[in-house]
Image (cartoon, rainbow, N blue to C red):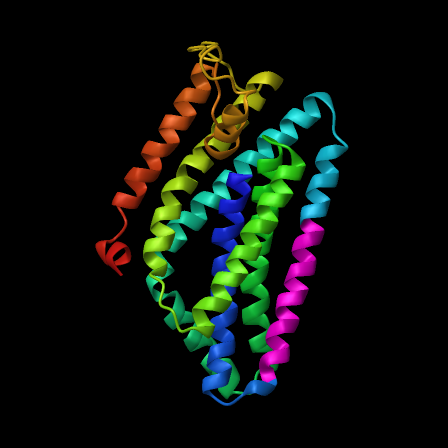
Amino acid sequence: MIASFLIALREGLEAALIVGLTLGVLAKTGRQQYRSAVWSGVVAAGVISLAAAGTLNLLGSNLEGKAEGIFEGVTMLLAAGVLTWMIFWMQRHSRRMQQEVESSMHQAATRGQRWGVFGIAFFAVLREGIEIALFLTATALTTSARQTVIGGLMGLATACLLGVGLFAASVRLDINRFFQITSVLLILFAAGLIAHSIHEFNEVGWIPVIVAPVWDINHILSEESNFGKTLKALFGYNGDPSLSEVVAYIGYCLLIILGIRRLPREDLDG
């Protein structure tokens, strides 16, 4: 539940901020007639995102045996890949996000481009919605679907309330700092997805285990306990991992840290 809440909160807040910025630009430029185009884009993107989530879950539920393991492994690996791209994208653009959105909206609104206004809201929400659908599908593979849905809905609700509150009360939020803090948690979450995907590929024989297990501490902290399940869903905890899982987890974290350190300083400092 914690993992799905965190993902939905982060992605939902980004979408809420972009929608809020678009509505704010329309209000400042006196073009309130385009508000319906913004909300139409939001609704259309939401419907497509829900359809994508339903399709992914339906596809996964109809698979068995080796095909199920391959689906789970590929889904987790894909989710980790998209999550990694998102982390780097936010590292580079979080400080400039407001200026970029306001500039695009101002151009579309002043030119009378209703479809342009629609497109900005639609693609912003669709991107976050598809990412949430993919991430929650991957999360549901490591925990119960019920907890994933509840956590996701709570995260989206919190994101909406924060977005409304920030703009209604003119409260300033250090977006860059928020995304930096959550990026640390999401890096560990993505590493867990990769390690779990390797576990699935171990089971179907695609990747050798090398050594299994490297250690077994389930007698100290069982992955079947409530705390163990939470750590498994959030950080990919495995009480008895194979060597290939451990190498994938540590290797991913090191590569991401090195990648972030190699970003141009102006992207990190804004």
For residue 244, above or below residue 103: above
Which percent across, then down, holds residue 228? 50, 24
- Give the residue at the far right of this rendering: 62
Question: Which quadrant: the N terminus?
Answer: top right
Q: Please indicate whether residue 266 sits to the left or right of residue 205 in the image.
A: left
Q: Is residue 240 left or right of residue 51?
A: left
Q: Residue at x 42, y 10 (%)?
A: 215
Residue 95 position, x and y percent, is 33, 63
Q: Which residues are magenta?
A: 34-52
| Camera-side residue of 115 and 219 | 219
Pick out the residue farthest to the bottom: 30
Q: Quadrant of residue 268?
A: bottom left
Question: Is 110 situated left or right of 179 in this image?
Answer: right
Image-quadrant location for residue 251? top left
The percent coordinates of residue 100 (x first, y second) are 40, 70
Is residue 8 covered in magenta?
no
Percent position (x, y) of residue 49? 65, 55
Image quarter of the C terminus: bottom left
Which residue appears at 50% of the width and 71% of the height? Answer: 20
Above or below for 176 versus 137: below
Can you see residue 66?
yes
The tally of labels here is 0
Magenta segment, principal secondary structure? Answer: helix
Q: Name which residue lies at 59% across and 80% down.
A: 35
The answer, for residue 205, to whether it is visible in the render is: no
